[in-house]
Image (tube, rainbow, N blue to C red):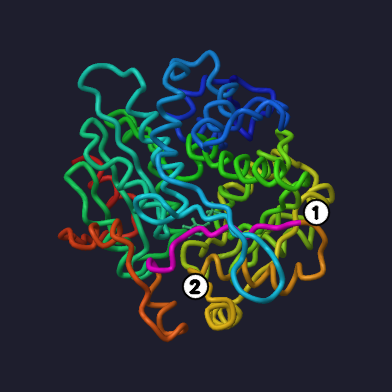
Amino acid sequence: MRFRSTRAPAGRTVALSRALLAGLAPDGGLYVPEALPLRSAEEFADCTTPAQIAARLLAPFFAGDPLAPHLEGLARDAFGWPLRLRALRGPGPAGRVLELFHGPTLAFKDLGARFLAAALEHLPRASGERLTVLVATSGDTGGAVAAAFDGRSAIDVVLLYPRGGVSARQEHQLTCWSRNVRAFAVRGSFDDCQRLVKGAFADSDLLRSRRLTSANSINVGRLLPQTVPYAWAALLHHREHGEPLGFVVPTGNLGNALAALWARAMGLPVGPVVLVTNANRAIPESLEHGAWRPRPAVRTLASAMDVGDASNMERLLDLVPDWRALRGRVRAFAVDDDEIRARIRMDAERRGEIWCPHTAAAAEVLATRLAHEGGAFAIVATAHPAKFEGVVEPLVGRSIEVPERLAALLRRPACIRELEATPEALRAVLRV
Ligand SMILES: *Cc1c(COP(=O)(O)O)cnc(C)c1O
């Protein structure tokens, strides 16, 4: 399979490895597969584990690439921890929960990050050549990327996050790694961080001295493995109940939800895909108005979704270029902080479910906007609540047990560095 830029539908294509290394296409667009191969549930009849499904689902994308012989190993590495599909607990409307947070940093981003890190390590490169992975993060991406690349000494990682825009535990998970992983608190918003990263990728001077790549959800190497949990959950549900499974997806940069839509476009039994944003309501508003209207990001309790200009919108519009058609394929709802707080409180009390703020937004939409809808839905649980204890604990009135994996990270010493939100400051960091 070859990959092309969203900005050049009939333009030059590149191999998967090239797309992974480049991150962004040279014309500033995002890489997408030339075509999404059509699959059927029967093809996966003998697959049970996510790793088996990953190897089979992703095979067409790897065909003809130097990475193809490594696919099974990559799948085993990236899906080395469990996914979980379970029923919602307690009384109230039925529903399911797809838990994607059982990886090393307890967020769904572990999965794509680990897959990409392992893939980049397998890529053939000139001896001694170092690769720098540059990432803007609103919290969870950076921790997952850091954990995935930690100790892979041929690869340097530079992480930019908005100062004060991440929780204390998130900050610790960004700043506690070995020397190949450096994190910087940028004096600005997440959108400023993203702008700096985009600027660096367009800086030809810099690129002469550095081999740069991204590990944001703009990298297609993160998106492809993210289709796997949707395929796995939908196939599991379909085998048991003979019907498709819809998903309610907490959404920021739209990487996670786009993966669900790609899985559906490949013919897997994925039902409705419902996007949930926090008070950053650019996506639901744009769907309503029929034109993309990005907005400056505002801070909310669901901080990993504080995005005003979702980078994967470009891929969504590539998949479904017509706004009217798009409205038929996805729905989107915004949930504000008051609703998030109320939902965390209510579900803890009545159902014994403790949500992270992002997952709470999805739970709110399932309970209030989809209550009368037929068909089965799973809310997508994107992070463990212990990562957002500052928000969650006061609302549920008790402390949340910290899983040992996270506790071990929190015991490591951290090193916090600040950075001006200017291209010059970033250039100085990348030249080191
Ligand atoms: C990143 C993140 C999201 C949003 O995912 P996107 O792919 O950016 O839409 C939601 N919840 C959590 C916990 C996250 O870390």
Q: What element carries label 1?
A: helix
Q: Is 408 displayed left or right of 53 in the figure?
A: left
Q: Give the range drawn in magenta.
A: 376-387
Q: Position of residue 111 (x, y in %)?
A: 44, 44
- Whether residue 281 is visible, yes or no, is yes
Q: How far is the residue under mark 1 from the one under mark 2?
A: 32 Å
Crowd band around label 2 with a 10 angstrom C-alpha radius: few (<14), some (14–19), many (20+) = many
Q: Earlier in the sequence, mark 1 or mark 2?
A: 1
Q: Where is residue 431 in the image (x, y as percent from the top left)?
A: 22, 40
Q: Looking at the rendering, in which quadrant would you find the C terminus?
A: top left
Q: Which residue corresponds to the image point at 72% horizontal and 37% vertical from the top-left? A: 265
Q: Where is residue 173 in the image (x, y as percent from the top left)?
A: 29, 58
Judge whether 127 appears above or below 46 on screen.
above
Q: Which mark is residue 327?
A: 1
Q: Which residue corresponds to the image point at 28% horizontal and 45% vertical from the top-left? A: 427
Residue 199 falls in image quadrant: top left
Q: Which amino acid does label 1 sit on?
A: Arg
In the foreground, 7 or 352 = 352
Decide if ligand 1 comes within 8 Å of the CB at mark 2.
Answer: no
The verdict on residue 379 being magenta is: yes
Q: Looking at the rendering, in which quadrant would you find the N terminus?
A: top right
Q: Name the residue under label 2.
A: 354
In the foreground, 246 or 430 = 246
